[in-house]
Image (tube, coloured by chain):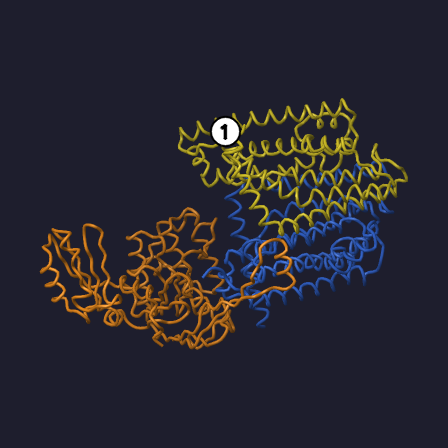
Chain colours: A orange, B blue, C yellow
């Protein structure tokens, strides 16, 4: 369905010197600096998949989405979606996709929500019967009924997001792009939105690409994730794969009865570990040790700890996906191309 | 056939948007009414200003009070029509591009220029339109104007093309924002020149006359076509010139716009 | 007084930086507006040529030209955003936040705007003044610059700005009643521009109307300073006019306080 190959986007940035003199100088002889937002990204998404697109702020997620939706033209590389190239024959292409930018709305601010849909119906040339059917479905999954007659400016953030998603789906697109669809929403609303996305995906095998910072989104929704950092792909695969690849991390947490004794614990020397394999945090009450279970087994860690200090409480847990990703962001894993 | 269908669809969309905008207007009735009164008053004050001048002199550079009113009234028509349909171009230069809001037009299955302009139907323009028509109605009986079929057709043609001189200039200057993010102030600067067209170009010095005739050709939006109807000049230059200028400006405008869209760089990360 | 300056100086500084940042936009903008002055200039030039008289209701062509450009300059330097700022604060509900800050609402805006106006004045005051004086010299062949008129003009200009600021703040409170201020601001600007002599000198108005308009606060905004600069007023008239300006300034300061106190009462009772 979606093929992306060696996609690259550079931006020219005019470097301005300060002061009036600088402005005049840059007016006549602009100095440009080239910024590479997306360096070299390739991936492929089959029909009906939900792909999570993650990465730290400024990684180039939005730029990729904008290239895939035809808003930006790539500097080089290829992307093809449903047999079409987004930035060529844009008008034809956008009929096949739906786009939601979580931080912006495409709804008409001053009008009742329903009006936006009647206008979009005409823009996308949806016929009456299809429109009725579609609205009924969207109503069911997104529960628009209670606020469809209210002016858009009076909607809550969660209602607005539901309304925006519905707006992007009116013309039954084959691919749906969601840029941070759960940003700023509370837990319950987030959950509603996730269920709706799932339902939409199942109904017509709509391919969904979403970017997010909320890893719950990823765990609950995505069949696969592509992680990018500094314009490059650093991971591509299922969640299980991510966990098994980077998930040897375990976390040992305990509350020592005797702090002095606990401070004499020296895991590094005992097990001959490097800084990469172990992180110790001590907040004066709980000590937490994150370690690589490939290097040292959980059993050995436990018995060494208990041999040195008595504890009030102790517990070992799997590192959750959030921890893993934080780790990858922090250490900046080399591209796994 | 395909073209016909396309045009039909464009008109249909336009109608729908106008309907939506009128609904929006109803939400802000008082605001609209006070704005419209303001626009009317501004024109009334201008009329008062002209009447003060003509209370002291019989004619201005050979033009009578009524003739000046005719030119003035004519100048308001294309301005109002452009204002009515293409007002959203101002927002392009002021904030749409700067805030990255242009993205949404690129995800619509219609041309970007159409998507932008159709979105706003600027009803304030009715103030100018009403005053313009009123000025014409008052002055026409007193300026020896032949009301015949040919003149009526020429009049409509002139107003039509004059409108696109306004639109073309706005289009070119707004498109600059695709590269600079912001160009409202540039549009403002050029747009202000249109006021020159309300009076006979003969009152200005030669450099200025040349500029408003050939460089920023606002003289063709009012003075040249209007003075043809007052019996000066010839149709080929006065009205043909309006058409040529409109076509050239729109062609350049659309070209610059398309160039701009393809080098549009969105905002944020 | 010193305490006030210390508290509000940062606002002036911020306004100054803000305006300096947008100076290029501002220059383009003013350039567009100066075009209008030239239209008026050419129009009046044609009027004087067509009329065959040396004066038009007591104004010579030089007087008229100076009037056009100096009234424009006065309008730009004494411009105030007060009604927009207050209107926006009310619309988005931020005005309630003003109650919890230990500073005076009006003074904070005033000092910020003073910073902005300083930048404006720095950019256009000297070039326009110089332009007008050079024009006068070229046309009349004599140096017509009168330092006393100029200094009194500056005093009157500052009063004009302050009146304009407080008038606009008072006007902005109408946002409590109206949903959107766009239309009413347009109407206001149109009326004020006319009544303050921004379009034609008030001397051109019919006698009775002219007399009333001279007393209204709007004359204090543009007409009085420009007439002082032109040297059209004798000493008693100047003193009376400045007195009138002071009166209107005090009037609007008090009006502003009254409305503000009423708003505070309303907000603390109804919660905004």
Viewer-proximal residue, A41 or B23?
Answer: A41
Seen in the image, is A279 located left or right of residue A329?
left
Percent x, y for residue B257?
60, 64
Residue in the picture at 62% in, 42% down? B36
The image shows residue C128 at horizontal and vertical percentages of 73, 44
Residue B182 located left or right of residue A118: right
Residue at which label 1 appears? C260
Q: Residues within 10 Å of mark 1 (few under 14, many from 20)?
A: some
Q: Chain of mark 1?
A: C
Tag 1 secondary structure? helix
**Image mark count:** 1
Q: Quadrant of the N terminus of chain C?
A: top right
Which corner quadrant holds the C terminus of chain C?
A: top left
In the rendering, at what x and y percent does residue A275 appear?
26, 65
Q: Residue at x 22, y 59 (%)?
A: A280
| A325 lies above or below C234 | below
> Is residue C24 shown left or right of residue C197?
left
Q: Quadrant of residue A199?
A: bottom left
Location of residue C246 in the rendering, given as x and y in whole percent from the top left corner: 64, 25
Is residue A150 placed above or below B158 in the rendered structure?
above
Foreground residue among A320 and A96: A320
> Which residue shows up at 48% across the image and 26% down it?
C261
Considering every residue shown, the one lying at the far right of the view is C52
Q: In this view of the protein, which residue sits in the foreground, C169 or C272?
A: C169
């Amino acid at each position: 369905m979606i093929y992306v190959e060696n996609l690259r986007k550079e931006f020219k940035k005019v470097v301005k010197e300060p002061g009036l003199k600088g402005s005049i100088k840059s007016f006549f002889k602009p100095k440009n600096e080239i910024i590479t937002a997306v360096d070299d990204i390739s991936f492929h998404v089959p029909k009906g998949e939900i792909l999570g697109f993650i990465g730290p702020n400024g990684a180039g997620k939005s730029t990729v989405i904008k290239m895939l939706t035809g808003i930006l033209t790539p500097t080089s590389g290829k992307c093809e979606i449903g047999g079409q190239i987004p930035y060529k024959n844009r008008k034809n292409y956008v009929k096949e996709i739906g786009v939601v930018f979580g931080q912006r709305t495409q709804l008409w601010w001053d009008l009742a929500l329903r009006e936006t849909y009647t206008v979009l119906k005409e823009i996308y040339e949806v016929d009456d019967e299809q429109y009725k059917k579609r609205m009924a479905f969207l109503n069911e999954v997104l529960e628009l009924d209670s606020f469809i007659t209210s002016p858009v400016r009076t909607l809550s953030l969660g209602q607005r997001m539901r309304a925006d998603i519905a707006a992007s789906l009116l013309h039954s697109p084959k691919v749906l792009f969601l840029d941070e669809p759960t940003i700023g929403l509370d837990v319950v609303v987030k959950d509603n939105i996730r269920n709706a996305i799932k339902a939409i995906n199942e109904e017509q095998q709509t391919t969904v690409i979403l970017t997010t910072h909320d890893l719950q989104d990823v765990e609950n929704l995505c069949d696969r994730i592509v992680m990018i950092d500094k314009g490059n792909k650093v991971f591509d695969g299922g969640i299980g794969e991510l966990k098994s690849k980077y998930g040897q991390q375990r976390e040992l947490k305990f509350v020592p009865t005797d702090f002095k004794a606990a401070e004499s614990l020296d895991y590094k020397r005992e097990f001959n570990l490097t800084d990469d394999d172990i992180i110790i945090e001590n907040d004066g009450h709980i000590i937490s040790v994150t370690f690589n279970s490939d290097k040292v087994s959980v059993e050995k860690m436990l018995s060494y700890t208990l041999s040195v200090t008595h504890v009030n409480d102790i517990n070992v847990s799997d590192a959750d996906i959030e921890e893993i990703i934080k780790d990858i962001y922090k250490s900046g894993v080399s591209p796994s191309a | 056939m395909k073209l016909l269908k396309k045009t039909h669809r464009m008109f249909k969309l336009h109608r729908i948007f106008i309907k939506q905008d009128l609904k929006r207007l109803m939400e802000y009735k008082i605001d609209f009414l006070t704005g419209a009164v303001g626009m009317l008053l501004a024109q009334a004050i201008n009329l008062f200003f002209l009447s003060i001048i003509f209370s002291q002199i019989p004619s201005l550079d050979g033009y009578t009070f009524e003739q000046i009113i005719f030119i003035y009234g004519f100048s308001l028509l294309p301005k109002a029509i452009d204002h009515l349909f293409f007002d959203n171009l101002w927002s392009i230069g002021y904030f749409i591009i700067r805030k990255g809001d242009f993205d949404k037009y690129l995800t619509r299955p219609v041309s970007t220029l159409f998507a932008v302009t159709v979105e706003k139907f600027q009803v304030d323009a009715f103030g100018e339109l009403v005053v313009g028509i009123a000025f014409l109605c008052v002055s026409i009986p007193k300026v020896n104007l032949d009301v015949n079929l040919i003149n009526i057709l020429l009049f409509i043609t002139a107003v039509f093309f004059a409108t696109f001189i306004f639109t073309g200039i706005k289009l070119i200057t707004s498109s600059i924002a695709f590269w600079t993010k912001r160009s409202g102030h540039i549009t403002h600067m050029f747009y202000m020149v249109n006021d020159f067209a309300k009076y006979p170009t003969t009152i200005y010095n030669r450099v200025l006359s040349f500029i408003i005739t050939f460089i920023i050709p606002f003289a063709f939006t009012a003075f040249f076509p209007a003075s043809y109807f007052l019996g000066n000049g010839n149709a080929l230059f006065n009205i043909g010139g309006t058409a040529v200028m409109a076509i050239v400006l729109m062609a350049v405008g659309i070209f610059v716009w398309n160039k701009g869209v393809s080098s549009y760089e969105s905002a944020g990360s | 007084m010193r305490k006030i300056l210390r508290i509000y100086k940062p606002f002036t500084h911020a306004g100054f930086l803000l305006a300096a940042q947008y100076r290029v936009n501002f220059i383009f903008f003013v350039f567009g507006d100066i075009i209008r002055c030239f239209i008026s200039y050419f129009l009046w030039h044609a009027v004087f040529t067509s009329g065959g008289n040396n004066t038009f209701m007591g104004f010579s062509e030089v007087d008229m030209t100076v009037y056009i450009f100096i009234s424009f300059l006065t309008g730009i330097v004494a411009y105030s955003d007060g009604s927009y700022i207050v209107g926006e604060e009310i619309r988005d509900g931020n005005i309630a936040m003003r109650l919890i800050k230990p500073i005076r609402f009006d003074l904070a805006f005033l000092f910020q705007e003073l910073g902005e106006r300083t930048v404006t004045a720095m950019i256009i005051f000297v070039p326009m003044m110089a332009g007008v004086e050079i024009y006068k010299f070229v046309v009349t062949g004599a140096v017509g610059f009168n330092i006393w008129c100029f200094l009194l003009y500056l005093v009157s200009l500052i009063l004009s700005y302050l009146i304009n600021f407080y008038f606009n703040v008072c006007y902005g409170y109408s946002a409590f009643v109206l949903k959107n201020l766009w239309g009413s601001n347009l109407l206001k600007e149109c009326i004020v521009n006319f009544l303050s002599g921004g379009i034609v000198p008030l001397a051109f108005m019919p006698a009775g109307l002219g007399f009333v308009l001279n007393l209204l606060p709007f004359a204090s905004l543009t007409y009085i300073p420009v007439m002082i600069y032109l040297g059209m007023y004798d000493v008693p008239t100047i003193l009376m006019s400045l007195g009138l300006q002071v009166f209107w300034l005090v009037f609007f300061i008090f009006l502003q306080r009254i409305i503000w106190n009423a708003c505070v009462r309303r907000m603390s009772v109804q919660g905004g």
